[in-house]
Amino acid sequence: MFTSINNIRIFPRLFILFTTLVIISSVAMVFLGFFFIQTEQTHAQAVKTSFDSQQIATTEQINLQRMNALLQARFAQIFAADNQQLQGDPSLTASGGLISDDIVARETDFNQMIQTYNTTYSISSSSNQNTIRSILKSDPANTHLITDQQTALNNVISTQWNAYKGLQDQVLNQLASQNPRYNTAYEILYQADQKFLDLQKSWDEVVTIATSVGQAVTTLTNAEIVPLEIATAIAAILIIAVIALTAFIVNSTISKRLGQLASLTGRIAQGKMRERVSVGGRDEIQVVASSMNTMLDNIVRLLQEAETRHTTLQQQVEKLINEVRGAGDGDLRVQAEVPPDSLGILANFINYMIMQLGSLVINFKTLANEVERATIQTYDDMTQLVDGSDLQIQQITAATTSVQEMTNTSRNVAQRAQSLAQVGRKVYETTQSGRVAVIHTVEGMENIKNNVHVSAAKIQALAEHSHAINDIVRIIAGIAYQTNRLALDASIQAAMAGENGKAFRAVADDIRRAAEVAKTQTNLAERIVKQVFEEIQDVTLSIQNTELETATGTQSSQDAGIAFEAIFAAIRQQAQEIEMINQAAEQQLQVSSNVVQIMQAVSTSTVQNTQSLHKESQRMERVAELAEQLLGYAEVFKLRDDQDIFAAPQEQSMMQQGIPQQSFPNMSYPGYPSQEDLYPFQTNSF
């Protein structure tokens, strides 16, 4: 049976089962309702019959009492007629006839009623009382009512009613005679009253039994409740049986088979990939089972292929790690073999990264050499400036001495007027020497100004080179950051791959550590370059101050030259203006004092310039040491023989102009990242 059911689709199967369940349950409920309605109708009919019995019995009880009362009234009326006052009263005669007729009518009615009551409402024999009889028999406490009613009815019908009726008729006949005798009539009436008491007692018992039967019938008894309970139990058992059968069919054809599929998935989760499930039928569960078996076959095949690929990939990754292991220690001469499979992209990228890193190291070394050469040249120029400043100080000292001597001579001019000519010649010669010295001083100051200007230009160029070095260091830091990020992404992908990505994750971790080392070194180089740049700015500010002071000294030297020209002109005119020698001597004394002051100021300024130049020389020596340290850091990396540490002249020119060298290889295979993807931080110029 289950085989045929399993061939049906699940939805039609469930629809048929639940439709059958609903139909059977509905039929059981309808049957139970019909049985309940029938029971209620039967009970209502029994109650109605009981109420009719009570009503008839009560009515006849009243009729019987009324009959006896009328008989008593008629007896009293007849014998009251002996009263002379009542004799001849026509109304009394008429009412007496009516009373007699009423008694006869009630006799006839009661006689017919007891016969009908016995036939219709006798619990023991009447078919109309079957339900009531069953109800009474179902309760042992009410069973006696059946026999008691029948006994009372038999007493009334058989003996008591006929006896009373006969005596009552005799009383009526006696009263209807012409000369009724009181004693005779009273004796008969007394006997009738005695029979009436027995009749009334029996009929009262019939009424009481009818009332008790009505109370018993009104209350539901076990005779009515038990059938209802049995019918309800049968309906419930039938519905539960149908539900259990439906549940059993659903469990056997659906749940049990789904349990087999769930058990299969549990075994598959435990790694038992060879497990399969066999489910009969042609429904959806069988289709799912077949699909799962096919899927498991495909998964087993894919796992085998994946295991093979994993073994191959692990060997290739280990080989790649061994090939590029030296790059982490700074050996950029390593090169990974590029296989033709998907791992070739990674190998090619690593080769490309190593090559670019080598190019950056070459550019870094080239720029460091340029900085060192420029620093050494600047240091040599500053040394020459210092030597020139020392010579200038000596010349200014000599000029100051000469001017002081000239001042002394001018003081003695007034006192030694006799030797004015000789002294004039000496003054002329001394003035000529002073003029030459002042000219030399002016020229020296011009040279100092030019040298300071050249030094400022070279310091500015050195600052630009520092900018270039800083940008290159930033590029290296960006490459290290990008490499670190790519290594982190590779580690994430390897972690997502689980056990299959452990080897690849190790490669990514090595690359990331190498990138972090490069990032640390570039950060150190960036700090050094920043310090050099700050010192270059200090040197630039000092050179600018030196330029201002040199310009001031040059102006002072020019003023001294003009003063010496005036002195020379005055001495030359000494012969013609001997008469004004005293005035000229005084003027010469004043001018000589001014010249001494100017020369002292020039000497002080020159000494300050020399001290500044000494400081700048020391700073340039420090810059040279830093450049040498940069070269030492760059020597950590080992390059191939075909990579020249000196860039081509065109490349040097480009770097001097601040244009970075772009030497990325052309990767032709698809999926390789572009230059913009690898270095999004690069621009067309520093």
Image (cartoon, grey):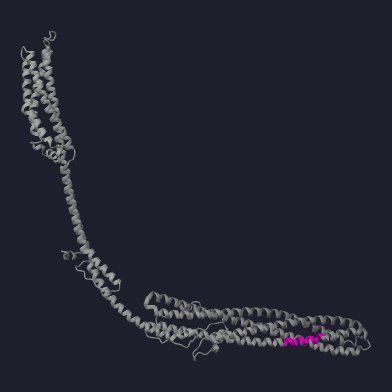
> In terms of depth relative to the viewer, which is nearer, 150 or 638?
150
Question: Does the segment drawn in magenta span residue 399?
Answer: yes
Q: In the rendered image, which quarter is residue 109 located in?
A: top left
| Bounds of the magenta segment | 388-400
Residue 268 figure quarter: bottom left
Query: Main SS type for the magenta part?
Result: helix
In the image, residue 378 lies in the stretch drawn in magenta: no
Q: Quadrant of the C terminus?
A: bottom right
Looking at the image, residue 465 lies above or below residue 142:
below
Q: Is residue 287 left or right of residue 107?
A: right
Name the spot of residue 179 as percent of width and height, x first.
6, 11
Q: Going 72% across and 85% down the picture, which residue do you hit?
A: 448
Q: Which image quarter: residue 260?
A: bottom left
Residue 310 showing in the rendered view? yes
Q: Is residue 686 visible?
A: no
Q: Position of residue 266 (x, y in %)?
A: 28, 69
